[in-house]
Amino acid sequence: MDYNTQREKLVLPEYGRHVQKMIEQVKAIEDKEKRSQQMRAVVQVMGILNPQIREFNDYKHKLWDHAHVIGGFDLDIDAPFPAPTPQQFEERPDVISLPERPIKAACYGRNIENMIALIADREEDDTKKEMIRVLALYMRQQYLIWNKDNVAEETIFADIERLSDGKLKVPADVHLGAISQNANFARPGQNAAQNGQGYGNNRKNRNWKRKK
């Protein structure tokens, strides 16, 4: 029996073993012109087997690069694009630096802190006042998700001032209003579990229907 585990490892699995074998057979052709011609046909097949690559503007270039990778970077052919080197694929991407500033309040997150900073830098006008009110409403919602069932608006206003390092103060005439009795501030995933949408609940429901 010929098992995949006993075969040569696939270089790029998205193209399959047949493409890898075709490229190996092309490499064995002695005539360079015929070898190049057959390689162009293989690249066309690769484009059919991996159609999503056509979403890239330079997809033809990528297909030829993939052909060189599968061929072990030693395809002696006349290709429409320069052959890549192994070093190009071994280079590690640049490290993305993460913000070193710690989050001041985990229940709000960094995005709210960034919004507070943007609003604090705006000039005083009615638009800024409305932005503060909407922000406070959203912060109250986030607070109630992770904390107790009720919170005074003064607590949210104090958090805004604290997170802005005193740069943003809520106007005295801004109020949040009462929380609707129908409001549900459950944590992510809790609603699904309570409504029986989890995997375990569905399985129990199916078993109960079978017994009936």
Image: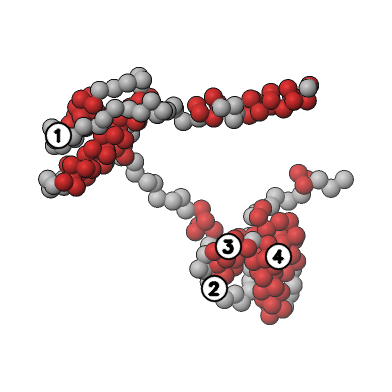
Kindly indicate the quadrant of the structure image that contains residue 49: bottom right
Q: Is residue 102 visible?
A: no
How crowded is the residue under tag 2: few (<14 C-alpha within 10 Å), some, or many (20+)? few
How crowded is the residue under tag 1: few (<14 C-alpha within 10 Å), some, or many (20+)? few
Tell me the residue that label 3 is attached to.
Answer: 53
Quarter the N terminus occupies: top right
Furthest toward the bottom, the residue is: 33
Furthest toward the right, the residue is: 1
Tell me the residue that label 2 is attached to.
Answer: 81
Q: Earlier in the sequence, mark 3 or mark 4?
A: 4
Q: Position of residue 23 (x, y in %)?
A: 70, 65
Tell me the residue that label 4 is attached to.
Answer: 23
Tell me how far mark 3 sits from mark 4, CA to CA: 19 Å
Residue displayed at 59% across by 26% down: 196
Q: Position of residue 201 (x, y in %)?
A: 64, 25
Q: Is residue 103 above or below residue 94?
A: above
Tell me how far mark 2 sits from mark 1, CA to CA: 67 Å
Tell me how far mark 4 sits from mark 1, CA to CA: 74 Å
Q: Earlier in the sequence, mark 4 or mark 1?
A: 4
At label 4, the amino acid type is Ile
Q: Earlier in the sequence, mark 3 or mark 2?
A: 3
Kindly indicate the quadrant of the structure image that contains residue 145: top left
Quarter the C terminus occupies: top right
User: What colour scheme governs how the chains and residues are painted in the rendered image of this protein?
Assistant: secondary structure
Kindly indicate the quadrant of the structure image that contains residue 70: bottom right
Q: Earlier in the sequence, mark 2 or mark 4?
A: 4
Secondary structure at numbered mark 3:
helix
Q: Is residue 190 visible?
A: yes
Q: Is residue 19 above or below residue 152?
A: below
Q: Position of residue 103 (x, y in %)?
A: 29, 32
At label 2, the amino acid type is Phe
